Amino acid sequence: EDKVVQSPLSLVVHEGDTVTLNCSYEVTNFRSLLWYKQEKKAPTFLFMLTSSGIEKKSGRLSSILDKKELFSILNITATQTGDSAVYLCAVEASGAQKLVFGQGTRLTINP
Amino acid sequence: GAVVSQHPSWVICKSGTSVKIECRSLDFQATTMFWYRQFPKQSLMLMATSNEGSKATYEQGVEKDKFLINHASLTLSTLTVTSAHPEDSSFYICSARKQGWGTDTQYFGPGTRLTVL
């Protein structure tokens, strides 16, 4: 059965800190790994990763995938209170179309 | 862009009534849409995969007669919760799959909060 595990489940830091969120997975015929940010409503897309070792970057957020060790990390530098959210990691298997989500990491940034 | 809308954003209904939720891809065509359910402080649970022009594929444990899905066009899928009961109260989120060059991405609608009294 395909599985995605995120850690930590909850994280509280101070504004300006750097955080690293982890996502490990087990999936048959891996196709892609996606990161989403969910605030009060539905998830918003952050990154899609398909190749190992290639960092994706958007402003203070970056992510990388390791297909050998079956994990991905999401880094946020110089955190701001607006980064407070639940960050979801999801994996898609080739041919399956559907996403398997992890439990999410609830990130709280205190001023 | 890739914008997905849902309507209504929230609905309150009496027990025993049916509620229809619409999911639209506004700036792209989506042959595949997905319906999720999310309980407070939990992750998204896939209910069904909606395929344009064919029957939906339901996940194990999801009652197809209770959660009716119709995907009549490339930009619209609907979820009807029939004979709703308080335990159906939840946050329902749809997503639409946008096909790209070699990679497809799912974009989510804003969600519909259903409260059944």
Image (cartoon, rainbow, N blue to C red):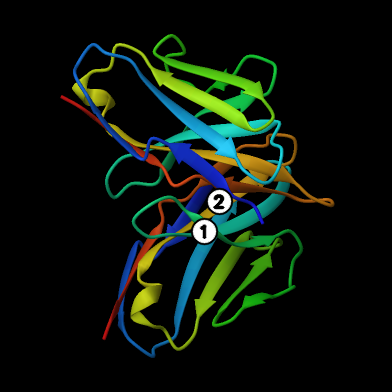
Q: Amino acid at mark 1?
A: Tyr
Q: Amino acid at mark 2?
A: Ala
- Which residue corresponds to the image point at 71% horizontal and 38% vertical from the top-left? B29
Residue B99 on image: x %, y %: 76, 44
**Residue B49 image-quadrant placement:** top right
Answer few, some or many: residues within 10 Å of disc 1's Cα (few below 14, many 20 plus, some between 14 and 19).
many
Query: Residue extending furthest left?
Result: B117
The residue that mark 1 highlights is A36
Residue A105 on image: x %, y %: 39, 62
From the image, state whether disc 2 or disc 1 is nearer to you. Answer: 1
Residue A31 on image: x %, y %: 73, 48
- Which residue corresponds to the image point at 66% horizontal and 41% vertical from the top-left? B97
Q: Is residue B67 above or below residue A75?
A: above
Of the pair A70 and A100, the residue shown nearer to us: A100
Using the rendered image of the protein, determine whether residue A27 is visible from the camera's viewpoint. Answer: no
Of the pair B3 and B69, the residue shown nearer to us: B3
Pointer 2 or 1: first along the chain: 1
**In the displayed structure image, the side of residue A1 where residue B1 appears, left or right:** right
Quadrant of image for the C terminus of chain A:
bottom left
In contact (CB < 8 Å): disc 2 and disc 1: yes
- Which residue corresponds to the image point at 68% horizontal and 66% vertical from the top-left? A66
Q: Write down the chain letter for disc 1.
A: A
The residue that mark 2 highlights is A90
Residue B101 on image: x %, y %: 84, 52
**Residue B15 image-quadrant placement:** top left
Quadrant of image for the N terminus of chain A:
top right
Of the pair B20 and A94, the residue shown nearer to us: B20
Instruction: Find the distance from the CA under tag 2 to the CA under tag 1.
Output: 8 Å
Of the pair B95 and A101, the residue shown nearer to us: B95
